[in-house]
Image (cartoon, rainbow, N blue to C red):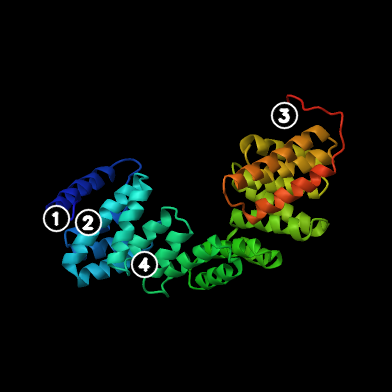
Amino acid sequence: CRTENPEAAQKWFNRIKQMDEEWSKLKPPKRIPGPYKILLHLAQGAIEQAKAELEHFRGNKIITKFAALELVEYAEANVKTGQTESRELLKVLVAFDLAVLKLSRDWSLELLKQRPTCQWAASIILASGVDESILREVHTILEPKNCSLARIIKAQHLMQTEEFTQAAALYGQLAQYQQDPTKYLLQQGTALENAGQFAEALKVYRRVWESSKNPIAANNAANMVSELAPQDTVQLTEAKKWIDEAVSTSPGIWIFRDTKGWISYLQGNQDEACEELRRVIKGVPNSLEFHYHLGAVEAAQGNSNLARWHLEAAIQLGQTRQNEGKTLTPAEVKALKRAGEALTKIEPGDREPTSENK
């Protein structure tokens, strides 16, 4: 599907169409992803077929329907250049799906510079994992500035530059225009949390939980209760209900189980907390926060040596990442500080680690 060889696009289209027909007969049936079929139609100038495919395309995690619609409308008004651009985007999409992310990002950036309104190219760049400088460059190029994608990129840039309050406001605006605002409300809650506005974050997470029963919202809301009211039995009981539901929905998510263990600890259920957090640390042995939580619980249980080991592990993990130039999240910074404080309070104990709890 090289730009200089339009006939190749027809060959690719015929082959993918054949594959789509063959896969549709499988049990269960499989289909070629919509973005590929839209691009293949546009690459050969088949605008009406692309429009028909667009009717069935609802968007995915990478390409939204708005980005696909923008491309189809551009190709309809500029058939020849639309064909050329679509062939290039096919290359980009293949590179992205093969996880050759730098190449797909570089090609997408070239296309975006040639046509700043190409939301498809900007979407690929955003999905490929980029740092603050590239986000800033993409936001500078992309037009119009008031489109949803430009706002999303701006919000992510604000998160990376730790301008959390502004990011929260922008995510809140994005949520207002969505039929299902869950994604942006969760991001708004995270931004508020990182800004230290725990009460506001809790309100957002509670709203999402009550409207959608999203387990991430339950987990995050329970975490906010642990920060805001660690000794409030009524609020902790409610938080425990939230996190129990989240764990029952997604038992394999370690961060949910960590929250469950921590809430149990705050409620005074030390045995349950210890059992849960020991299980968590075996699943995720390199989490600064998880080591701090288990260290605090082991200390409460009187297991001084185990507590010291986990707290020192938390501190070492944090210092290593900082020495490597990696940025700790606000939650990790807090856990690192608390681990250091907890370590100074531990007295030498006579309980040694056993094979069961190492």
Foreground mark, 4 or 3, reads: 3
Upstream in sequence: badge 1 or badge 2? 1
Foreground mark, 4 or 1, reads: 1
What is the three-letter code of the residue carrying label 3?
A: Lys
Residue assigned mark 4: 66
Query: How far apart in space, not on screen, are marks 3 and 1 (Cα)?
Result: 63 Å
Classify residue 326 as left or right of residue 241.
left
Q: Secondary structure at mark 1?
A: helix
Upstream in sequence: badge 3 or badge 1? 1
- State whether residue 208 appears in this view: no
Query: How far apart in space, not on screen, are marks 4 and 2 (Cα)?
Result: 19 Å
Classify residue 59 as left or right of residue 200.
left
Identify the residue at horizontal 26%, vertical 58% (top origin).
38
Residue contact between numbered discs 1 and 2, judged by CB atoms under 8 Å: yes
Q: Secondary structure at mark 4?
A: helix
Query: How far apart in space, not on screen, are marks 1 and 2 (Cα)?
Result: 8 Å
Front residue of 303/134: it is 134
What is the three-letter code of the residue carrying label 1?
A: Pro
Residue assigned mark 3: 358
Identify the residue at horizontal 41%, vertical 53% (top origin).
128
